[in-house]
Amino acid sequence: MIISYKERIASRLTLVTAMIVLVVFAIIYLVVDFTVVQSIDRELKLETDKHVGQIFLVDGEIRFVHKDEWQEQEHSQIQLNPIFIEIVDMQGNSMDKSPNLGENHLSFSGDKREKNEAWTLKTGGREVRQMQIPLNHAGKREGFMLVAKSFEDARQLLTNLRNILLILYPGILISLFLSMRFLAGKSIQPIQKIIQKTNLISQSNLNERIPVAEPNDEIAQLTRSINDLLARLEQALTREKQFTSDASHELRTPLAVMRGTLEVLIRKPRTSEEYVEKVKLALESIDRMSEMIDQLLSLARVGKGKMVRDEVELTSFTQAFAQQSAEESGREILFETNLSKPIFRLVNEKSLQMILNNLLQNAIKYSSSSSKIIMQVGSHEGAPFILVKDEGKGITSDSLAKIFDPFYRELDETGAAVPGTGLGLAIVKKLALESEIQVEVESEKGRGSIFRLIF
Ligand code: ADP
């Protein structure tokens, strides 16, 4: 069963309110009950005090101080607010009682003899509140006076109050639940609009955005977050489309070269030298394509799978790398450092090797074979760095922002064809991002470039 959000809010709030209202109602009932009983008991006490000085038991006989007055008083009070009086001896046998009791008797309670407290009981079908006072004469206890007062009005009041509270309670809760449900529904209306609008956005209309509603509250923030996410998705999709189209375009060029070469070859019989020359050309195109496919695969693999980080000592690692690259390329690669202590960093060794290799291959490619290349390890403001410096053709300031984009290659005004795919620096950027290494570049056209990896 799916319970909607507004119903969940309404039922939770109603549940909490139900408990609070229950406690409040219980307190109201108990306070009224206590006050009513207290007030009756106070009246009962007054009556008792009044009568106790007027009646005596002497040797088993009842004596009144002012019998006429007492009867008169009793008579007038019976009509308005019935007071029941009964005199009993030490065993609880009735000796006399007020006429308003009729056939009924008050109840003598042995254990309440000494305590001056009242209790509720039923006599002749009426509920009364009763008190029991000992009657002494000459220091000797002769019997008891039982004084009672009707509890019916009070009971009526308490029953009415209880019934009103019992009727009010579910009424309050139902109306509370309905109004909370309505209000919660109203409050989540903007969210429903966002859901409807978001559901309409797909890959084909990813440029659409959800209107941000006023005021600037959490819902507006949510809308903005969804819009930002859509913008990021749109950018990523555009980048991906661009990448696919660039990759297809780049692969088509060597394919076209190969096709042209082979077509020329089959048009008529050729000499064996011509065959060798054309096949070599076709092979070069194949090499170019495989290099590009290898680099595309490397680019796709970055970020996939778990990255293992090892403690790498940067100085010795770079020195060994420079030495090996110099031997393999036959170029002069100088290693420099101003550090006296070894410097360890947690990096993925393979990634670092790939980054340095791409940077060094570019330095070799884009500089004359007689110029030197420098690899340097140092520390700047506490951050260790590795730099690759060449004295080659340099990069124009316009291109500096673009060289890390896939397939971007600076046009060579001299027309000298330097082989490449435009993917090397894109791989460097992605690997560096993954390894949390910052890449900075400084370059001056015609003077050389410096690529710096900051750890
Ligand atoms: P590729 O070298 O295969 O063209 P890269 O992504 O490695 O691709 O480099 C992109 C472009 O950046 C290169 O085409 C080149 O124009 C420029 N570039 C990179 N490194 C250097 C460098 N050391 N000196 C001059 N230009 C460079």
Image (cartoon, rainbow, N blue to C red):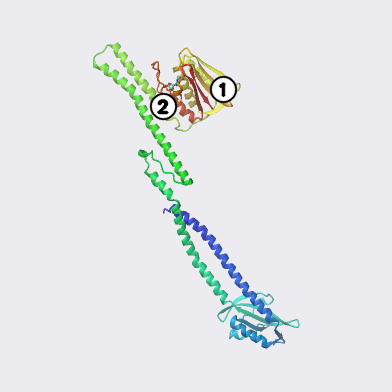
From the viewer's perspective, tell me whether residue 293 is left or right of residue 309: left
* Amino acid type for the residue under numbered disc 2: Pro
User: Residue 125: x, y in percent?
Assistant: 55, 80
Q: Tell which residue pokes out farthest to the front in this image.
A: 214
What is the quadrant of the C terminus in the image?
top right
Image quadrant in which you'd find residue 396: top left
Image quadrant in which you'd find residue 204: top left
**Mark 1 close to ligand 1, CB under 8 Å:** no
Q: Name the residue under label 1.
A: 378
What is the quadrant of the N terminus in the image?
bottom left
- From where the camera sits, is residue 166 visible? yes
Q: Where's ligand 1: which quadrant?
A: top left
**Mark 2 close to ligand 1, CB under 8 Å:** yes
Identity of the residue drawn at 51% across and 25% down: 453
* Amino acid type for the residue under numbered disc 1: Gly
User: Residue 220: x, y in percent?
Assistant: 46, 45
**As drawn, 133 above or below 224:** below
From the viewer's perspective, tell me whether residue 240 is left or right of residue 390: left
Identity of the residue drawn at 39% across and 34% down: 237
Identity of the residue drawn at 38% across and 40% down: 208
User: Residue 224: x, y in percent?
Assistant: 45, 42
Q: How crowded is mark 1: few (under 14 residues within 10 Å), some or many (20 or more)?
A: some
Q: How crowded is mark 2: few (under 14 residues within 10 Å), some or many (20 or more)?
A: many
Q: Is mark 1 on a helix, strand or loop?
A: strand
Q: Is mark 2 on a helix, strand or loop?
A: loop
Residue closer to the observer: 156 or 114: 156
**As drawn, 348 above or below 160:** above
Q: Name the residue under label 2.
A: 406
* Marks 1 and 2, the one that precedes in the sequence: 1
**As drawn, 146 above or below 258:** below
- From where the camera sits, is residue 319 visible? no
